[in-house]
Image: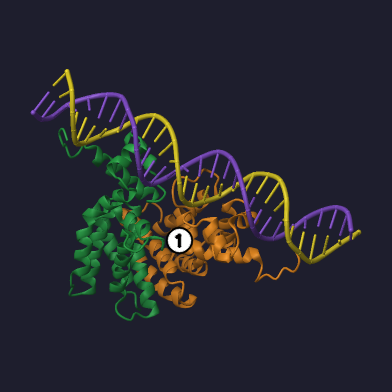
Chain colours: A green, B orange, C purple, D yellow
DNA sequence: CACCGTTCTGTACGGTCGTACAGAACGACG
DNA sequence: CGTCGTTCTGTACGACCGTACAGAACGGTG
């Protein structure tokens, strides 16, 4: 490496373009050629840096990984405290939330041991945490509604400042969560 | 047509299998061969009945079409009345909601004039109706949260009876919708 | 029986995808 | 200068997709 300017590195430029394209079109719908042309390279150049395509997604998800396990393993006094932490997590990593929730853990096609397996487990764990043990049908619906509201709202409002989204989303999600009336 | 038993017709069996597979894996991720093997045919047999693959999606969406335009064109006294009608629509057609919301109107790749164009317009129209004219950022977030909660909750709880989902979802969505506090 | 439309099979084609591989360009280092 | 590792290009391959087309099977109709 000649001079490893972290901002203008080719790898970083590929990662940035991939993050944006994945957020817009989804993982499977974005080809290496799409990413390559966005950076001004050929698809083989992209494949050189990220050998299996999965590595691109893995490297994008990586910074969120420790936040994910912290979120799952932590104990919270309150369900509302958990929801607040969940909202904070989702908003902070909103540029890759679609990648995490839809694309990687999308179908059942993921072979056991693949990253998709872990992501799906994470999503189900979030839902279980929201729904509580032995949830009634209405509780299941409510929990999935909360998960869906988090994902959708955060993906669609990437142009808004983080704090605005966080505040409005926390209000909406906790209202939906406590709608047992 | 020999005897057009509507239940055991091959076309209907293909449609049923396609509806289920589309709901599980999504439109693009389901190949004609997948559908064919689910029905016990070859992919060319499926292609014979539904010449472009789009026709499969179109025929599945068709029964929801008139409900869609009725929903968009109707005037409602109340925002809550609109939300209630929206929840009813979403729950009634929950087996194809994913097809409508994600797959057809998913990327920007849809050429103008395609069905994806209309679906995306429908989704944006729903959001605009929920967000109101000239929405502030928080209103936009809230509206997308409602849309996301509807879609996600309905897709994930296909095993629950329709009325249970409708009731719980209406409560959650209207709580999120009115969370301007 | 001859004819025909419907339904389905088998084969093949063009396109796109991710991947593999050989080699060119080029600065670093001895 | 020669050699090396890094970075990127060009080409090609195999897999998969949707689609097109010729023909077999078969019941209905003349």
Viewer-proximal residue, A180 or B72?
A180
Say which residue appears at 59% left-offset and 63% top-offset.
Answer: B15
Q: Residue at x 40, y 78 (%)?
A: A137
Residue B139 appears anywhere in the view: no
A69 with respect to B65 (left or right): left
Q: What element does badge 1 sit on? A: helix
Rendering quarter of residue B3: bottom right
Q: Position of residue A162 (x, y in %)?
A: 24, 53
- B77, above or below B115, in the image: below
Q: Is residue D21 above or below residue A172?
A: above
Image quadrant containing the N terminus of chain B: bottom right
| Residue A12 picture quarter | top left
Question: Dot 1 corresponds to which residue?
Answer: B25
- Where residue B9 sits: x, y (%)? 66, 67
Q: Is residue D6 above or below residue B106?
A: above
Q: Using the image as rendered, state which of residue A12 and residue C14 is in the foreground.
A: C14
Image coordinates for residue B11, horizontal then vertical, percent = 64, 63
How many marks the image carries: the answer is: 1
Q: Residue A143's quadrant in the figure? A: bottom left
> Where does the image place residue B87, in percent across and percent down from the top left?
46, 68
Query: Does the image show residue A176?
Result: yes
Could you tell me which quadrant the C terminus of chain B lies in?
Answer: bottom left
Q: Chain of mark 1?
A: B
Q: Is residue B52 above or below residue B179?
A: above
């Amino acid at each position: 490496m000649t001079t490893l300017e972290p901002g203008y590195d080719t790898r970083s430029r590929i990662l940035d373009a991939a993050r944006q394209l994945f957020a817009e079109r989804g993982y499977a719908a974005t080809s290496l050629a799409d990413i390559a042309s966005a950076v001004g390279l050929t698809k083989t150049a992209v494949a050189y840096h990220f050998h299996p395509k999965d590595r691109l997604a893995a490297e994008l998800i990586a910074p969120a990984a420790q936040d994910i396990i912290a979120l799952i393993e932590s104990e919270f006094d309150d369900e509302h405290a958990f929801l607040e932490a969940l909202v904070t997590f989702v908003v902070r990593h909103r540029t890759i939330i679609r990648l995490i929730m839809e694309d990687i853990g999308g179908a059942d096609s993921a072979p056991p041991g693949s990253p998709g397996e872990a992501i799906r487990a994470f999503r189900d764990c979030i839902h279980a945490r929201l729904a509580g043990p032995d949830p009634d049908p209405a509780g299941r619906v409510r929990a999935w509604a909360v998960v869906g509201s988090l994902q959708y709202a955060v993906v669609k409002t990437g142009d808004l400042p983080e704090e605005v989204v966080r505040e409005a989303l926390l209000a909406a999600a906790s209202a939906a969560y406590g709608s047992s009336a």
